[in-house]
Amino acid sequence: MPRILRNKYFLSLLFFGLWMIFFDHNDLFQQNARSKELRELKDSKAFYEDQIGQTAEELKNINSSNRALEKIAREKYMMKKDNEDLFIIPAEQH
């Protein structure tokens, strides 16, 4: 038997390393899963921050101009004036 395998410090270190990699609550596989989840959360945070910026810009435009308010009301919410008729033409899907 090699001398290093009889060394109690080496065996303790080996046991500790194996325990931390495979059996601990925060093992290597859990750490990888949490890192992946963290990356996904950071990506979604960036997406939502971008959406918040766009919404804030739209809100600024709506509050500053009646023309912009009317445009958004017509395009997004299909609102119309009382004396108008509204015709919705669906876009062709290929």
Image: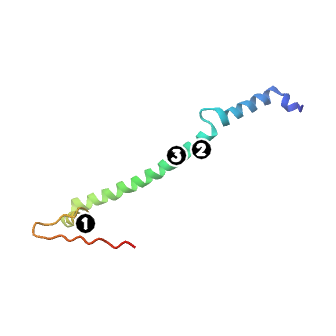
Secondary structure of the residue carrying numbered label 3: helix
Give the CA separation, mark 2 to mark 3: 9 Å
* Labelled disc at residue 15: none
Residue at (21% x, 66% y) in the render = 74
Residue extending farthest top: 8
Give the CA separation, mark 1 to mark 2: 45 Å
- Amino acid of disc 2: Asn
Secondary structure of the residue carrying numbered label 1: helix
* Labelled disc at residue 32: 2
Residue at (16% x, 66% y) in the render = 80
Q: Is residue 56 above or below residue 35?
A: below
Residue 35 or residue 30, whichever sits in front = 30
Which numbered disc flags the more N-terminal residue, 2 or 3?
A: 2
Residue at (71% x, 34% y) in the render = 18
* Labelled disc at residue 75: 1
Q: Quadrant of residue 66?
A: bottom left
Mark 3 — residue?
37
List x then y, in percent, for residue 89: 26, 72
Circles 1, 2 touching at the beta carbon (< 8 Å): no
Q: Quadrant of the C terminus?
A: bottom left
List x then y, in percent, for residue 23: 65, 33
Q: Quadrant of the N terminus?
A: top right
In the shown orientation, is residue 87 left or right of residue 35?
left
Residue 94 or residue 23, whichever sits in front = 94
Residue extending farthest left: 83
Give the CA separation, mark 3 to mark 1: 37 Å
Circles 2, 3 touching at the beta carbon (< 8 Å): no
List x then y, in percent, for residue 60: 26, 59
Q: Is residue 62 above or below residue 24?
A: below
Total numbered badges shown on the rendered structure? 3
- Amino acid of disc 1: Glu
Which numbered disc flags the more N-terminal residue, 1 or 2?
A: 2
